Amino acid sequence: MADTERLNHVGGKDVPAASGTTLRLVDPATGLPQATAPLSGPEDVDAACRAAGDALPGWSATTPGQRQTALLRIADALERHADVVAHAEVTDTGKPRALFLADELPAIVDVLRYFAGAARNLPGAAAAEYTPGRTSMLRREPIGVCAQITPWNYPLMMAVWKIAPALAAGNTVVLKPSDTTPSSATLLAGLAAEHLPPGVLNVVCGDRDTGRALVAHPEVRLVAVTGSVRAGREIAAAAAADLKRLHLELGGNAPVLIHEDADLDDAVEQLASLAFYNAGQDCTAATRIMVHHGVHDAFLEAFAARAAGLRPGAPDEEGADFGPLANAAQLASVQGLLARLPDHAEVVTGGAAVDRPGYFHQATVIAGARQRDEIVQSEVFGPVVTVQPFADEAEAFRMANDVPQGLAASVWTRDHDRAMRASRALHTGIVWVNTHGTTVSEMPHGGVRHSGHGSDLSLTGLLDYTQVKHVML
């Protein structure tokens, strides 16, 4: 991959868009152009989908052990080329290089290795005679060509979360990364090409129209997307025309419930890091903190002080706690939400963009917001946290569930029974107790309601990329 030119990866080859048209990639830490990527059109999408279709019979016929070997080798390649991978990721996103190498890359490699093993452990009902003289058994088979669309907040991680289970199950893939952060996906495709047959993994760069062409392509049998609720709705409507299967991981607006018996020092320390990690551009970020009224003021004071000490910075800037917003549009979105705050809401700390090149924004804490306010109901996707009081457990549950999204939540308490009640009452796909934001490859990651359906990670995520066949002998 050239330093300033990204290319599609189709049928095992790196190629430009057929039209020669490109997108300009901007470094969010400087606001300056840093590379180009193909602006793929229907012709490019068709070539990638046909390459995936041609590769499907051979790849789906491989054994789970053969697929395991390929995924393990891809994981090893990412580790060997860690510096190159990190450069591609942080140049597109602006996130701190040290944090990417310490936190994200090991987790990405672990996902590949997990699904390498899971490929050899597909579950199923035991063969048995459910009617006299006939033996029934189940087969789990790949679905076919999978279209996968990934976002700009964790470009490489979300690409691996998508491709690893799809390939482990014997499917072939056409991946479209975000138009602003395609570099690590194209690099991944090039590294994987040494271990996969041509056409098994294809990457096409482009914009929303590229994504629309991919979703509509007749070769595609499953569409998986991590993105906004708006994108999920549009993709669901388009996929319905051909009855394609859907896997949607959409927005979040995570509630955090801090009860009067919680360890406030621990909560402040953990949440200050987890709420602003990646500049708050995380669908599970701790964005709505609700605190029992008896400890609300003490928590707010300590949390705001901790947030005020956090510093955004460029990828290699010493002491940077988080990077910039990923693009100018996202910075404008965050600024717009803050500009529209009602008079009863108070910016306790932060509240403004940082006066320097790039798309940096201060860590921001807001008090006094009410449940129907836009800042509470909307997913901010930036370094902004609201802190609200609640009177009792019942009110805390009502406030937590009173948003359209349902991806993740956390509860902070020393009371085991209260934690168990919360795990039942919170309408989310993930509930953490006295922690927030941690994922493991072995457990599912997915939401309910407007946060979508289907699971990334875990055996559940692998099964989402299979279809079941009943065989009777």
Image (cartoon, rainbow, N blue to C red):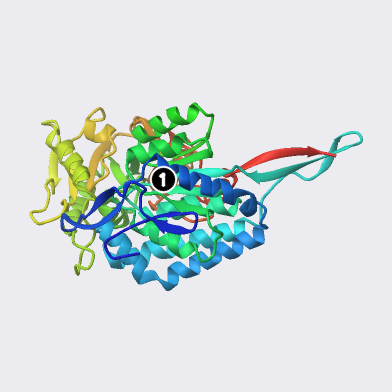
Q: Residue furthest front?
A: 19
Residue at horizontal 36 percent and vertical 53 percent from the top: 16
- Circle 1 packing at 10 Å, graded few (<14), some (14-19), many (20+), is many
**Drawn side of residue 119 relative to residue 5, left or right:** right
Residue 284 placement (x, y as % from top left): 36, 46
Residue at horizontal 52 percent and vertical 35 percent from the top: 218
Quadrant assignment, res 309: bottom left
Residue denoted by label 1: 44
The quadrant the N terminus occupies is bottom left
Residue 155 placement (x, y as % from top left): 36, 53
Q: Nearer the viewer, residue 83 or 348?
A: 83
Quadrant assignment, res 234: top left
The quadrant the C terminus occupies is top right
Amino acid type, label 1: Asp
**Drawn side of residue 371 relative to residue 367, left or right:** right
**Drawn side of residue 168 relative to residue 183, left or right:** right
